[in-house]
Amino acid sequence: MSSLEKPSGLGPPAWQNTIRLRLMERQAEAELQNEVLDQYRRLSKTARDLKDRNRALLRGGAGSGSGSGPSSGEGSPVVSRPSPILSHLDAQLSTLRAELSTVYRTQAASQNRQLALSDALRDRDEEVRGLREEVRELRDARDTAVRKEKDWDERWKMRTKDLETLNDEILSLNVELSGMAQNNAALKADNASLLQRWLDKMNLTAEEMNEDFEKETTKHVGSKESGVPRDFQQGGKI
């Protein structure tokens, strides 16, 4: 996966450099194959020209030998010696055939090499395709993780705000509770004071009533003790 990672500089990605290098290699192979084909064309043209010259020389040598060939007295034919030109041409033809077979072998090796490079390039393309798919999946996973992280950040912010709101409400309730406790304490103190004052007043009233009752009782008892003799003194009757 390191071949597809983007470099830290401002240059193109690594996969573009890889594709460019492969295209350059393919172009170099095509140029080599074109050079081999040009050599093959030149050799074919040279062989064709030499073949035509050989045919012309053979036709010329056959015409001259049929008119001036030596013969024996018994009429038996004399074997003619091969011409040096024909020997030279045969040697050139053999050399050209050897060069042509070398060119054929070179071309076959080049084709085999081209096929091997094509297979390697196909394998590399498959590998690059697989790596691209893997990179796409990793990017999707990264985007999903980023979205989840953003969602969790939003949730955390909302929970933080909710906690702050709850803390504020708790503080306000504590303040209210403390105020109510102070009010209750003040009310208890007022009630105790009022109750004490009422008890004091009731005690004072009871004492006054007791005093009045004692006074009335004393008066009533005194009137009873002095009432009978007075009646007898006033009317002489009961």
Image: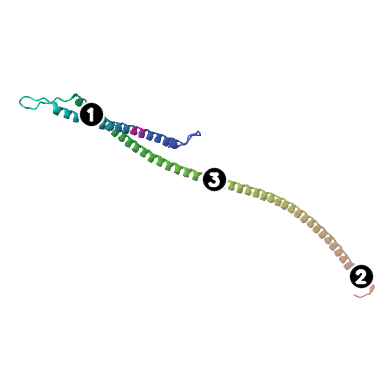
Q: Is residue 95 left or right of residue 3?
A: left
Dot 3, crowdedness within 10 Å: few (<14), some or many (≥20)? few
Q: CA distance from mark 2 to mark 1?
A: 198 Å
Please name the amino acid that badge 1 sits on: Leu
Specify the quadrant of the image occupied by residue 51.
Answer: top left
Q: Nearer the viewer, mark 1 or mark 3?
A: 1
The one of 215 and 69 positioned closer to us in this rendering = 69
Asked if residue 103 shows in the view, the reply is no
Judging by the rendered image, the residue that carries numbered circle 2 is 229
Judging by the rendered image, the residue that carries numbered circle 1 is 93
The residue at the far front in this view is 67
Q: CA distance from mark 1 to mark 3?
A: 82 Å
Specify the quadrant of the image occupied by residue 90.
Answer: top left
Q: Is residue 177 left or right of residue 67?
A: right
Sequence-wise first label, 3 or 2: 3
Q: Quadrant of the C terminus?
A: bottom right
Q: Which residues are magenta?
A: 30-34
Residue 82 appears at what percent x and percent y? Answer: 16, 25
Please name the amino acid that badge 3 sits on: Lys
Residue 2 appears at what percent x and percent y? Answer: 43, 35
The secondary element bearing badge 1 is classed as helix
Residue at left offset 59%, top offset 48%? 158
Dot 2, crowdedness within 10 Å: few (<14), some or many (≥20)? few
Residue 131 appears at what percent x and percent y? Answer: 41, 40
The residue at the far right in this view is 234
Majority SS type along the magenta span: helix
Does the magenta-highlighted stretch encompass residue 141?
no
Residue 124 appears at what percent x and percent y? Answer: 38, 38
Sequence-wise first label, 2 or 1: 1
Judging by the rendered image, the residue that carries numbered circle 3 is 150
